[in-house]
Image (spheres, grey):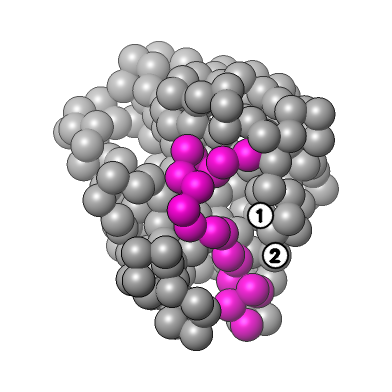
């Protein structure tokens, strides 16, 4: 059984990490169910285990939190749905690469609920959308923008951290970092794409698509 938790308001990042780690440890001990935690953070930057300090271009703009998740710098803030996934990967096949692919599929399926085509890109983490109405990339390929980020950590075969989907954040807040170390492409959101989507709409879509991608915990 996977428990769904939705927090209103803005959740302190340090508190969220402590809660995630405690829940992951309890899951590993067999003392708690898997959990998906949906929340928003106040404006902040996180530095993953591969973060390059040069990619923090405005270090005084928002608080910066080192984190154990994989990846580089990311932004979290109001209007962005963060989904922390505390799942028992030990019971789900112990295949980390497959799990990361499932997280990507989860985002893509969720975006599909709103008629948005999310795509993977080799060598670029996260989920991307093509913007043919925008000027092309410097290499002449169609404009692509990032709409979701993924970063996980594993402890005793239980995951934590997770993903974030840009619903209606202030996109200028991403200017203080090179998101995920990729400077050639911009960021977008569901509302920026012209969709009048609410956070509650995204929560419904996340829950609906989760079951299609992950299914129940094997017995």
> In which quadrant will I find the N terminus?
top left
Label 1, residues with CA under 10 Å away: few <14, some 14-19, many ≥20? many
Under circle 1, the secondary element is strand
Does the residue at mark 1 contact the one at mark 2 (Cβ under 8 Å)? no
Count every numbered label the image shows and give the total: 2
* Towards the viewer: 159 or 74: 74
Compared to residue 194, the image places residue 50 above or below, namely: above
Residue at 68% in and 48% down:
175
Q: Looking at the picture, how far across and down is residue 167, in whole percent? A: 63, 64
Q: Residue at x 77, y 42 (%)?
A: 43
Instruction: Tell me which segment is drawn in magenta.
Output: 177-194
Residue of label 2: 168
Query: What secondary structure characterizes most of the magenta part?
Result: loop
Residue 90 sits in which quadrant? top left
Does residue 182 show up magenta in the picture? yes
Left or right of 144 on screen, residue 192: right
Point out residue 129 in the picture as x, y percentages from the top left corner: 43, 69
Distance from disc 1 to disc 2, alpha carbons, whole Å, reads 6 Å
Determine which residue is flagged by label 1: 80
Confirm whether residue 26 shows in the render.
no
Look at 56% across and 59% down and name the residue there: 187
- Name the disc covering residue 174, or none: none
């Amino acid at each position: 059984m996977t428990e769904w938790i939705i927090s209103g308001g803005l959740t302190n990042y340090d508190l969220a990490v402590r809660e995630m780690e405690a829940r992951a440890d309890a899951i590993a001990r067999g003392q708690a169910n898997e959990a998906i935690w949906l929340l928003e953070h106040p404006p902040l930057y996180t530095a993953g285990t591969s973060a390059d300090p040069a990619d923090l271009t405005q270090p005084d703009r928002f608080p910066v939190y080192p984190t154990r998740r994989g990846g580089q710098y990311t932004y979290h803030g109001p209007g962005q749905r963060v989904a922390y996934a505390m799942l028992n990967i030990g019971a789900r096949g112990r295949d980390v690469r497959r799990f990361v692919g499932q997280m990507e599929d989860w985002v893509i399926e969720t975006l599909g609920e709103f008629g948005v085509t999310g795509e993977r890109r080799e060598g670029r983490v996260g989920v991307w959308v093509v913007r043919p109405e925008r000027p092309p990339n410097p290499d002449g390929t169609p404009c692509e923008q990032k709409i979701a980020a993924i970063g996980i950590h594993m402890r005793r075969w239980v995951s934590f951290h997770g993903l974030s989907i840009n619903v209606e954040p202030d996109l200028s807040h991403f200017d203080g970092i090179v998101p995920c170390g990729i400077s050639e492409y911009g960021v977008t959101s569901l509302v920026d794409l012209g969709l009048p989507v609410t956070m509650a709409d995204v929560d419904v879509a996340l829950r609906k698509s989760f079951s299609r991608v992950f299914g129940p915990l094997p017995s």
